[in-house]
Image (cartoon, rainbow, N blue to C red):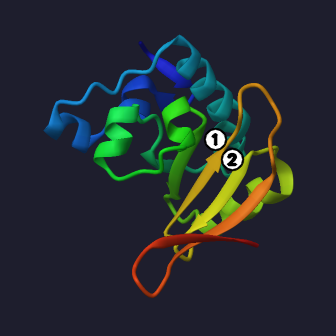
Amino acid sequence: MGFISKNITYKEATHSETAIDKGVDNNPNVVQIESMRNVAEKIFQPVREHFNKPMRINSFFRSKELNKAIGGSGSSQHCKGEAIDVKGLSGLTNKEIFDYIRENLEFDQLINEYDYKWIHFSLKLEGGNRSQVLEAYKNESGKTKYKSI
């Protein structure tokens, strides 16, 4: 398949150890690939080029079956190819990534995951983006919760 964007290969965007271990198909359809290219080109690439430093993709596309297997949200934008979770590398902090996106780019959701452990960002293909800025945290019972910031 090649590349989703200049710095993201198809293999990197669809790779999942869980999918491999469980024999789950994690190949996107044509519309999902279009969504993947959209979020990669409009958010990932501008961040990558602004800082000129690599980012590790923790999670990009997830088939519904894979998302269920990892306990993901039933409404996860990863299943549509609209969301990417990243970590900074080579001295690029997750907070820098978060702040740059928040201040400079259009997005649907931007989430600081567990005190900048990683950054989640999404962008809808058809527009109607909410510009929602959230923080994920664990409550007393260990359940993930989100609050607006």
Q: Can residue 16 be spotted in the picture?
A: yes
Picture residue at 24% right of the left edge, 36% below the top: 19
- Please tell me whether residue 79 is drawn above or below residue 136 in the rendered image: above
Q: Is residue 25 left or right of residue 81?
A: left
Amino acid type shown at disc 2: Val
Q: In the picture shown, does residue 61 fall above or below 90?
A: above
**Where's residue 60, x and y in %?**
47, 39
In the image as oriented, which residue stretches furthest toward the bottom? 140
Crowding around mark 1 (Cα neighbors within 10 Å: few <14, some 14 to 19, many 20+) is: many
Q: Residue at x 41, y 12 (%)?
A: 1
Residue nearest the observer in this picture, 32 or 99: 32
Question: Dividing the picture into quarters, in which one does residue 36 lie?
Answer: top right
Question: Relative to 86, is 135 on the left or the right?
Answer: right
Residue placed most toward the observer, 80 or 7: 80
Describe the element under mark 2 as helix, strand or loop: helix
Residue drawn at (44%, 45%), measured in percent from left and top? Answer: 59
Residue 124 drawn above or below residue 110: above
Please say if the residues under marks 2 and 1 sit with CB atoms less than 8 Å apart: yes
Q: x, y percentage for residue 111?
A: 64, 61
Q: Can residue 15 be spotted in the picture?
A: no
Report the residue at 48% width, 45% height from top.
74
Residue count near mark 2 (Cα–Cα under 10 Å), binned few <14, some 14–19, many ≥20: many
Q: Which residue is under mark 2?
A: 47
Horizontal and vertical percent for residue 25? 28, 24
Q: Which quadrant of the figure contains the C terminus?
A: bottom right
Q: Is residue 44 left or right of residue 60?
A: right
Q: CA distance from mark 2 to mark 1?
A: 5 Å
Total number of numbered discs in the rendering: 2
**For numbered disc 1, what is the local secondary structure?**
helix
Say left or right for 143 vs 43: left
Callout 1 amino acid = Phe
Q: Which residue is mark 1?
A: 44
